[in-house]
Image (cartoon, grey):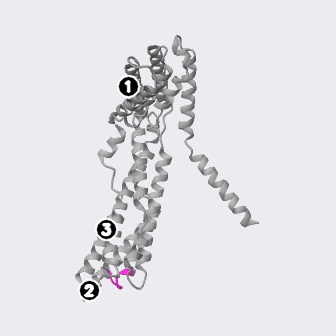
Amino acid sequence: MTDAVTPAVTSRSTLATRVRRLPWGPTLTTGAAGAIAFWIGAVFPGPAGEFPYYAPLGAVVAMSSTVMGSVRKSIQSIVSIWLGSAIALAVGAVLSPSPATVALVIAAGTIAGTWSWLDDTGHWVPTAALFVLIIGTEDPVAFVSAFGGLTLIGAAIGVLMTVLFPQLPLAPMERAITDVRAEVLVQLRRLAQALHGGRPPTENEWSEHRAQLAPAVENMRAARQLVVEAARANRRREPYRHRLDRQLEQAASLERVCLLVEELTQLLEEEERAENDHVGLGSELRPHTARTLLALADLVQSGDGRTADPGVKADAQDALSALVDRIQEVRVGDSPDDELFTAGSIVTTIRRCLETPRPVSTTDEATWTA
């Protein structure tokens, strides 16, 4: 009975987690902005009242997860729409609607939409041009006024809703940090596992022990950039300042650790390889290095350095000291210089990991508080 119930419970738990992670805040804000814009468009006097759906269109295209992003996107979208309308008016003034005219308008709009300043709103240029050419044939000037005016009003409503109900995506940033920490743990433990064998791994075996740190780090950088941008002109920033500071520091610390772990991984792959005539560590230093890497993994798992368990950090430092002592003992013997050089490089890299985190720089703080 337990085996039958467990998958169902797990499935419900997974579904509940996915539902909780849906962007409910932006969804409700966008829906409310669209509804308000449609109501205003419907009661708008003159010909514009015949096209109330363009107002919520402006609200939707202007919505963003950040205040500054909403302002920027609304301006870009309106410029794109007006630019497309101008293209359609210019072509329609000399040519009547036809397949050739439609092709010409779309081609001109597509080219104009590649303007880098428009960013991802450039697709609205050919779309707006097509709308004006086909729908606004009877009274193009009135249609363009309604189209451009209502989308501008809708965009203003979208910006206002973003200002009143700004998003501060701390949860995605937290998940991104957790994902990076998990990948670092996987990499450190795989390296330790590879060094526990009686012989050094081959080149193919090393490739099997490599974790995918880069995608997780890139995702964390994107989440950090979104948080930094969302904090600008955000009235919810002050109550969450401490959490923001902590997240930014954790991200900076983990990124530094990732770079060091990548450096450590590359060093071991190149120097401690079965195909080499002389390996970098040798049988005397591999076990001690593996224990040090496991201790470092425990430290990374326990927190961000400031919140890490003091006992775990002390254990990591003791493991590193034991490795240094063992290197000193080996140095007395006849070990090759490259073995001692590799061991010394590993010690230096691990020590730099233990020194992380470093305080957030003034530049970093100024970036998100500006």
Residue depicted at x 42% and y 34%:
123
What residue is shown with label 1?
Answer: 83
Q: Residues within 10 Å of mark 3 (few under 14, many from 20)?
A: some
The residue type indicated by label 2 comes to Ser
As helix, strand or loop, the secondary structure at mark 2 comes to loop
Label 3 to label 1: alpha-carbon separation: 55 Å
What residue is shown with label 3?
Answer: 349
Going from the N terminus, do you reach mark 1 or mark 2 first? 1
The residue type indicated by label 1 comes to Leu
Q: How crowded is mark 1: few (under 14 residues within 10 Å), some or many (20 or more)?
A: many
Label 1 to label 2: alpha-carbon separation: 73 Å
Q: In the rendered view, would you say 146 is above or below 324?
A: above
Residue depicted at x 58% and y 20%:
39
What residue is shown with label 2?
Answer: 335
Going from the N terminus, do you reach mark 3 or mark 2 first? 2
Residue depicted at x 37% and y 36%:
119
Q: How many marks?
A: 3
